[in-house]
């Protein structure tokens, strides 16, 4: 395992990439509404990233055909934007990576469209909170397992299941770097966090069972029992006394 330690200059460049990622999410948020197609949302994001000097690095990554991933309801991750219209009552997870000045930033949010049941509102709220429970564990000298355990413990306390086949990851000049950051596990296990490491933490929680499968498009991951799923992610730097969220503003 090769874990890259970033310099202050590199982390500043990643913060700039993260800021563009944040602004792109805000642009998407303004346009999300019933009747818009996922392809239209993808174009809005693509054009905004390009206009602001970035590169939508999901586009073409291992053959992925769009600039952002849009996953709806029982789709966990990697949904491909198409002519599907978003409708009232959907939950829409949007995940993408922005490259700026040679560095990547990765972030995901799940949006509620219109009105949904209380349990789906809770799923979205608790998945986001699980992300922050994990982030709060980040500081030098702590092991990745502490992040994983905090997410899993919070999820299970709120009767949500944790997808185990998909994990967070290191990030830098590449979208995916070492180490893996699982959303389940035991405290005091896994790689040690050190100042200058940058990781993407991304809980994916389901209302039903944790099991997932891949659709025939070889990208979209869905829950096996068709239960709704939510996904939140931030790119986070390990600082000398804690952490800094690079995709938060």
Image (cartoon, grey):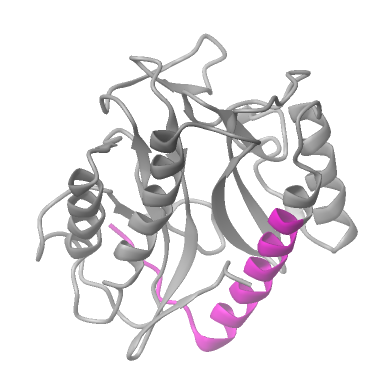
Q: Residue at x 68, y 59 (%)?
A: 99
Verify whether residue 116 appears in magenta.
no
Q: Position of residue 244 (x, y in %)?
A: 46, 79
Q: Residue furthest top?
A: 216
Residue 190 vs residue 236, the one in the foreground: 236
Vertical arrangement, residue 121 with respect to residue 218, above or below: below
Name the main secondary structure of what is drawn in magenta: helix
Vertical arrangement, residue 143 with respect to residue 89, above or below: below
Vertical arrangement, residue 135 with respect to residue 73, above or below: below
Q: Residue furthest bottom?
A: 241
Residue 156 vs residue 216, the one in the foreground: 156
Q: Which residues are magenta?
A: 1-26
Q: In screen coordinates, is 199 left or right of 110?
A: left
Q: In screen coordinates, is 100 left or right of 135?
A: right
Q: Residue at x 84, y 53 (%)?
A: 48
Q: In screen coordinates, is 3 left or right of 43?
A: left
Quadrant including the C terminus: bottom right
Verify whether residue 25 appears in magenta.
yes
Residue 51 vs residue 117, the one in the foreground: 117
């Amino acid at each position: 395992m090769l874990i890259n330690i970033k310099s202050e200059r590199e982390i500043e460049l990643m913060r700039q990439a993260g800021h563009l990622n944040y602004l792109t999410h805000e642009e998407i948020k303004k346009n999300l509404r019933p009747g818009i197609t996922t392809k239209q949302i993808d174009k809005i994001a693509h054009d905004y990233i390009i206009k602001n000097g970035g590169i939508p690095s999901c586009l073409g990554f291992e053959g992925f055909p769009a600039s952002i991933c849009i996953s709806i309801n029982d789709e966990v991750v990697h949904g491909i934007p198409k002519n599907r219209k978003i409708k009232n009552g959907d939950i829409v997870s949007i995940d993408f990576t922005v490259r700026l000045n040679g560095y990547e930033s990765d972030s995901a949010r799940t949006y509620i469209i219109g009105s949904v049941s209380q349990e789906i509102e809770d799923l979205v709220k608790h998945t986001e909170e699980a992300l922050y429970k994990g982030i709060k564990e980040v500081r030098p000298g702590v092991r990745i397992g502490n992040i994983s355990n905090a997410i899993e413990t919070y999820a299970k306390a709120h009767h949500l299941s944790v997808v185990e086949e998909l994990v967070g990851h290191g990030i830098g000049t590449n979208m995916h770097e070492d180490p893996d950051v699982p959303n389940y596990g035991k405290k005091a296990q896994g790689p040690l966090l050190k100042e200058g490491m940058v990781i993407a933490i991304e809980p994916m929680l389901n209302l039903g069972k944790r099991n997932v499968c891949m659709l025939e498009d070889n990208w979209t991951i869905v829950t096996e029992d068709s239960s709704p799923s939510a996904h939140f992610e931030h790119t986070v730097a390990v600082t000398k006394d804690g952490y800094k969220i690079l995709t938060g503003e």
